[in-house]
Image (cartoon, rainbow, N blue to C red):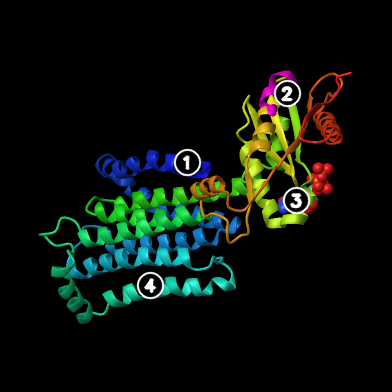
Amino acid sequence: MSASDRTLLFLLVLLLPAALWLPGYVVMHYPEQVFLLRSTPWYTLGAALLLSQVYQQGRVGFITLLAMGCYGLIHTRLAGPMIGPQAELEFWLLGLCAPLLALLLLVLPERQPFHRLGLGHWLLLALLLGALIGISQSGDWAMSLHAWLAPRAFLFMDSSPAPLLLVLWQLMCACAAWLVYLNRGESGDVAALLLTVTLMLMTLGFARPLIAASLFAVLGLALFVSVLEHGHQIAFLDELTGIPGRRALNLALKRLGRRYTLAMTDIDHFKKFNDTYGHDVGDEVLKLVAARLSKVKGGGKVYRYGGEEFTILFAGKTPKQCRAALEAVRQDIEEYPFMVRSSKERPEDNQDGKRQRGSGGGKQVQITLSLGVAQRSRKYGDVESVIKAADTALYAAKKAGRNCIRQAPEK
Ligand SMILES: Nc1nc2c(ncn2[C@@H]2O[C@H](COP(=O)(O)OP(=O)(O)OP(=O)(O)O)[C@@H](O)[C@H]2O)c(=O)[nH]1
């Protein structure tokens, strides 16, 4: 689970009980504030929509629009006790179609809501809302549909405490969204999952007053946070390797105290590697090296400096205190059995990869690193001089035959 997923989960665990408890509390103690709770989803969903536009998160944008459409229907047509076959039918159709549309938006190519290419997605949304309103307004036809459905589909009837089939359907859609989220893991995939779960919770608790307002307010907040997290990732994480990038390093360098050690490291003969096996295999090596380096001990934090160069930062440490940790990562990479395969042979997941490494599929190649280390001192007083000194030491390590560590001279 990524850091952004953890943040989102934390937020939901914190907010969902509050969302279930708040409506009752407001109705009982502050009935005059009910309108405030009713309008909150418009603010949170509106903020999520705006931010998704800023960060070009089209999928989240459309799911947010769908959520707004659902809440709009619930707010204007289904608020208050569910009375009459027409309201039942509308609720049922909405609960049935909205998760399906969320899944559709999940698998369709990503489009921006305010771009001409997003027109097809808008049409889908309009079709759903139009069809729902059209069916429910169609008088006799709606009544006969309701009469046919009611005994078969557990509609809201005296004999049925919960619309069981609807919940099961929404649970299935939520599971499908969860699977796509797990397997594809693209930014924005979580949005469909959040919406389907919200619809399911709402169906389960529909008898409670203001439950839709409360749940959709939390949904808006969760979508907002997920887009914000995505913005943070774009800004601070390296796209290829997923570890913190140059901007994150620059920020960290500004927050350092008087004592720190910095190591610059570079993959040996990487150009030759790229030329021999291709750029995509080179990318795989970069990812692997980043992942292994990130396991560095001794309080080191790893950043991709650029290209095939990485920086390891040890705040509050001297080179002597970091030496063992650096030697351990150098050795770890040297001993790692990296298999070169064509893209067809490459395993789908980590477990397959481990098995194939054991079975000897593909060609095994050795990756090595050279490292240059420098610390802040009287000689290297500012960050630029420390980086330069570490770079010079790295050059010395290359000259010394590579796959080794060299330290910048102190005098
Ligand atoms: N695959 C891939 N290659 C990259 C990336 N960034 C930089 N490179 C390659 O890294 C190589 C760096 O080569 P050089 O700087 O000449 O160094 P080297 O071949 O590693 O040789 P030494 O450092 O002297 O051991 C170049 O071929 C770049 O194209 C990347 O994101 N992906």
Residue labelled with disc 4: 128
Q: Earlier in the sequence, mark 4 or mark 2?
A: 4
Estimate how packed mark 2 is, as few (under 14), some (14 to 19) or many (20 or more) residues with alpha carbons within 10 Å: many
- Residue 5 is situated, as x and y percent measured from the top left of the image, at 48, 45
Q: Quadrant of residue 341?
A: bottom right
Estimate how packed mark 3 is, as few (under 14), some (14 to 19) or many (20 or more) residues with alpha carbons within 10 Å: some
Where are the magenta residues, as a range? 319-327
Asked if residue 277 is among those painted magenta in the image, a careful observer would answer no
Q: Earlier in the sequence, mark 2 or mark 3?
A: 2
Q: Secondary structure at mark 4?
A: helix
Distance between the alpha carbons at the discs numbered 2 and 1? 30 Å
- Residue 135 is situated, as x and y percent measured from the top left of the image, at 28, 77
* Farthest residue, direction front: 360
Tag shown at residue 273:
3
**Kind of residue sitting beneath label 3:** Phe
Estimate how packed mark 1 is, as few (under 14), some (14 to 19) or many (20 or more) residues with alpha carbons within 10 Å: few
Choose between 397 and 294: the one closer to the eye: 397
**Kind of residue sitting beneath label 1:** Arg
Choose between 160 and 106: the one closer to the eye: 106
Tag shown at residue 6:
1
- Residue 159 is situated, as x and y percent measured from the top left of the image, at 10, 59
User: At 35% across and 53% down in the image, what residue appears?
Assistant: 198
Tag shown at residue 260:
2
